[in-house]
Image (cartoon, rainbow, N blue to C red):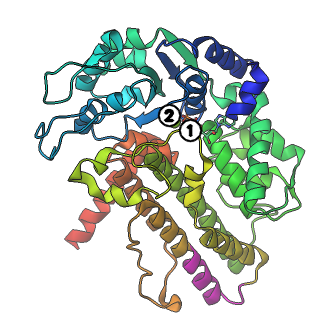
Amino acid sequence: MDRTSMQERFGIIGTSPGIRHVLDRVRQVAPTDITVLIEGESGVGKELVAKAVHELSSRRHNPMLTINCAAIPEGLLESELFGNEKGAYTGAVERRRGYFEESNGSSIFLDEIGEMPLSAQVRLLRVLETGEYSRVGSSTVLYSDVRVIAATNRNLGQDVASGRFREDLYYRLSTVIVTVPPLRDRKEDILPIFESFRHKFTQRYNRPMRTLDASAQSLLLRYRWPGNARELRNLAEQTAVLLRSETITADDIRPFLRGVSGSGSEAGLLPVRTTGQVSKDPESRERGLIYGALLELKKDVAELKDSVGQLIARPPPEWSAPHSAQHTSLRPSQLGPHLESGSDESASPSSFMLDDEDSFIEDVAYEIEQGNGENGEDLSVAAAGSAASGQASGSAASGQAASGSGAGLSSSEVEIPSLEDSERRLIEEALKRYNGNRRQTAEVLGISERTLYRKIKEYEKSDAAEEES
Ligand SMILES: Nc1ncnc2c1ncn2[C@@H]1O[C@H](COP(=O)(O)OP(=O)(O)O)[C@@H](O)[C@H]1O
Ligand SMILES: [Mg+2]
């Protein structure tokens, strides 16, 4: 199969030397049974690559199982992967087959392998070397013919040096390394990927496909893309849904980019649309602020949904273990009892979007932008309603009842939550999702760990202050 047909088949867009190199590598190693380690920042397309490796192998007739090692609580990963005997640990109420047993004859994709606890690493090394493993709590030797494809966004070499990752396993995994470069290092791929996603989303939401002007293109090319293709995809969805102008300019998209840190004038721009000069008129300033807050909220909710969607797509283990049952309700009915296999779009995070709520946000944003709020009161009510529905849709995706202050109140009583409150709620929600893992939480929220740490400290301080008073 040539490179172009591979790209069409797997939806891998790009003509950069980086992508071509990746594809050539995939084509070489896919038909073998060699373990492949895919390296690259979050959102660069590692999972697409893993699927391509599996689909181009002779194992393609069996579905590949995807396990996100970071999404499964440390103490459970071993039994999830290798199975357990009844009573092997508290809560192991029955004997359970592990993923290695289930994917016998197929491939297993171990995403975020750098998060794998050391004890599980020992078992993994053994199964890689000999095909042998045993269930947790049993000494019976079992055999599984599984091809392992692993991915990491960490520097595993560094983890080996610091003792977080076993050196022998690292050498075993790194026989073939496929490195997917960050988007900023393959600029020629940015616009084609963006346009393809925009095309998809304008169709999905039944919107016109608008033109990107030169300023917008140049901003996209200069931006750092910390979230890589995933962030590009989110931006394409947001622009498709939210933007109304005939052509899309740099000013239109700047508010969606995380802390645009470009040189000079762009540094430190507020995430609020700032075309024209800053207005002295308090009402339109308020409009601007609310509009900005809505966009931020929409963006945060989209990112949270994305992360929740990922958690769901690689379900945590609780359907077999009772201890964290709150996730069970998250599993969308269209997913099978086990794991996502293949690239079915219906299982993608976007399918958790509540379209009505989205267009409500959009309509309110539009009203505000047009200055149609008759007076400040009406405006804040409308905005509060939509902010609340934004939260509700985020919570719906996370399967938890909104504990928002709006519940049970009539709309005129609802107050618009402050940005800080919304931010805090999102941070807390994300922390919960990731079982308090700050690195992952920071990553999914697009802030640094240090910032997250600082925020948590601030919340603790203000809670303490409140208690005292
Ligand atoms: N080269 C590419 N062309 C088109 N879409 C891409 C490309 N790379 C990544 N994507 C998309 O970006 C998103 C993130 O990709 P994913 O494979 O999940 O990244 P990772 O596993 O590295 O975090 C997915 O929606 C994926 O389809
Ligand atoms: Mg991934």
Residue 187 counted in the magenta span: no
- Which label is found at residue 225? none
For disc 2, the marked residue is 63
* Residue 292 position (above or below residue 19): below
Q: As displayed, is residue 187 above or below residue 144?
A: below
Instruction: Kindly state the secondary structure of the residue where label 1 is placed.
Output: loop
452 left or right of 77? Answer: right
> In the rendered view of the protein, which quadrant contains the C terminus?
bottom left
Q: Quadrant of residue 296?
A: bottom right
Amino acid of disc 2: Pro
Check disc 1 and give the amino acid type. Answer: Gly
Q: Nearer the viewer, mark 1 or mark 2?
A: 2
Residue drawn 89% across the image and 44% down it: 214
Is the N terminus in the top left, top right, bottom left or bottom right quadrant? top right
On whether residue 382 falls in the magenta region, the answer is yes
Is 339 placed left or right of 12 in the picture? left
Residues tagged 1 and 2 counted as in contact (Cβ below 8 A): yes
Q: Residue at x 75, y 83 (%)?
A: 372
As drawn, is 84 to the left or to the right of 17? left
Q: Position of residue 203 (x, y in %)?
A: 78, 57
- Residue 85 in the image: x percent, y percent? 15, 35
Q: Residue at x 68, y 19 (%)?
A: 23
* Main secondary structure type of the part rendered in magenta: helix
Mark 1, Cα crowd under 10 Å, few <14 / some 14-19 / many 20+, is some
Q: Which residues are magenta?
A: 373-386
Q: CA distance from mark 1 to mark 2?
A: 7 Å
452 vs 361: above or below: above
Q: Residues within 10 Å of mark 2 (few under 14, many from 20)?
A: some
**Which x, y percent locates residue 267?**
67, 44
Measured from the top left, where is residue 343 in percent x and y?
59, 41
Q: Which residue is mark 1?
A: 342
- Of residues 55 and 200, the one nearer the viewer is 55
